[in-house]
Amino acid sequence: MEKRTLFLLQETEEFMRGELDNVTVANSRIMLDVVQGGYVPYGCYTSPAIPLAPFDALRPSWNAFTPPGTAVEAQARVMVDGNWTAWSAFGKWSPFLARESAAPSARGALALDGDRLWLDSKIATHVQMRIYLYTKDDKQTPSVSLLGASVHRVDVIPGGGRPVNARLHLPPYSVARRAPALKARMDLACAIAGLTNRWGADILPEELVLAMQDGRGCTNLSFGAAAMGCWGFPAWVRWADLGDLRAELRAGYGVVVELDSTPVQLAAGMPERRYAALRGFGMVEGELHALLNDPWAADNDFETETTMPLDDFLVAWTNLALCMRPRVPAPEHGGPWRSSVTLRRAGRDMPGLYRIYLSGEVRELPDDFCGDEEHPGGVLAWTAQEERPHATTAHKQFHFVRPESGGIRLPDSTGSLTKYTVYAIDPSGCMLVGDVTI
């Protein structure tokens, strides 16, 4: 029997096969133990040792719900020549933290870089995962609903699988239309939003990017999968082949893929490595193509729906994929949330300026709410009512602005009533949203 390259733990029975230290399992989630009416400060879950196909690299995945004041930290070790390596940590995770992935490091043949653990001139045969749960509030616990790892198999010719002619309708988003300060790091979030919003989630790419961005950049696929999990979408990273992609599309699921850009694309301003949503495979002018939503391909959302000859796609694709499944119920406040607000004029002496009120209390926006290009903070924007309805909110024309005197400035009246919607997204991805008619 051929050994696998991916393992996922996500059910109570599967979790119970591991070691529980100050944690328990309930409703297919790992949570901290309760002692004397409160959650313990920390605990650890360790998976069984998992035999996998011989491999030289590993990428972890986890989905966790982490209320403010809580966090999780995934770790892994591998077996080389019959011996376990030391544990490697991939950074503490919560949308409410200033997240930072693991710094590049090396120990013998083992190297760690962000969301990848790899071996130099060595082969591993087993993986063991563990995840720490932390809380500063004995009334709150993080909970883990998925833990897994994908490994890069060595000396294997990738499989092609059974051909499939499938076309999914995924909302496309262009990085050019997103928040300017975040534009350079928006492609992964745009691709993920296409997958989630297909299922009616209506998440803004800015919400996603703020919830998953890494202090070392925004190309951490493990953090991307964790962010999707915060919104209730089971998600994981894997090394895949063409057969795996075809199987996902055949089952009706889109996939985020990592692509290397060509010299021509680099000259056009695309990054060296970018992310796109794979929405199918099909014939184009008699040739088999991969069908993509490539956020860097155009300035208009719907012009990012591109195709690529299959052979060219296989050259550009790094064999990394971010997979997901439809939404499942998620704990309240286990991840970024939205709150409805009202908008009121700041005063006659401040024409055009509006203040945000939450539950009757004013919410002042600090001058540095949006940060700067070097250190982006939150996002403040408004949209106006448009004649043509859009399939998702993110397709509206967003106007990205900065706070003024603790509020937001909206356009002067044009003589007819216009409804404006204001969005204030903090660095954790939590959003205040409200309407005002002027």
Image (spheres, rainbow, N blue to C red):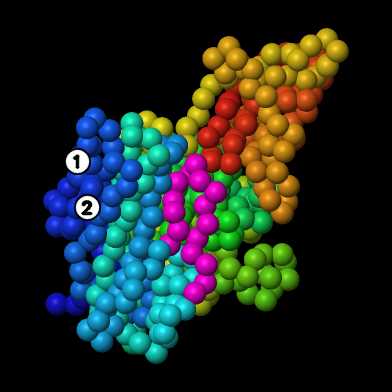
* Residue at image location 58% in from the left, 56% down from the top: 215
* Residue at image location 73% in from the left, 19% down from the top: 354
**In the rendered image, which residue does mark 1 sit on?**
26
The percent position of residue 143, horizontal first and vertical second, equals 31, 43
Q: Give the distance between the C-alpha atoms of the residues marked 1 and 2, in whole angstroms.
A: 15 Å
Give whichever of 4, 125 is nearer the camera.
Answer: 125
Look at the image and give the residue range highlighted in magenta: 90-105
Q: Quadrant of residue 427?
A: top right
92 in magenta: yes
Quadrant where the image shows the C terminus: top right
* Residue at image location 63% in from the left, 74% down from the top: 262
Which three-letter amino acid code belongs to the residue tagged 2?
Asp
Q: Secondary structure at mark 1?
A: strand
Circles 1 and 2, Cβ within 8 Å, touching? The answer is no
Query: What residue occupies the far top of the structure in this picture?
Result: 348
- Dot placed on the residue nearer the N-terminal end, 1 or 2: 2
Residue 168 seen anywhere in this rendered image of the structure: no
Give whichever of 76, 339 is nearer the camera.
Answer: 76
The percent position of residue 20, horizontal first and vertical second, equals 19, 53
The percent position of residue 348, horizontal first and vertical second, equals 83, 10
Q: Which mark is residue 21?
A: 2
The relative height of residue 272 versus residue 124 in the rendered view (above or below) is above
The relative height of residue 41 versus residue 374 in the rendered view (above or below) is above
Residue 272 seen anywhere in this rendered image of the structure: yes
The relative height of residue 45 versus residue 143 in the rendered view (above or below) is below
Quadrant where the image shows the N terminus: bottom left
Q: Quadrant of residue 127?
A: bottom left
* Residue at image location 49% in from the left, 74% down from the top: 105
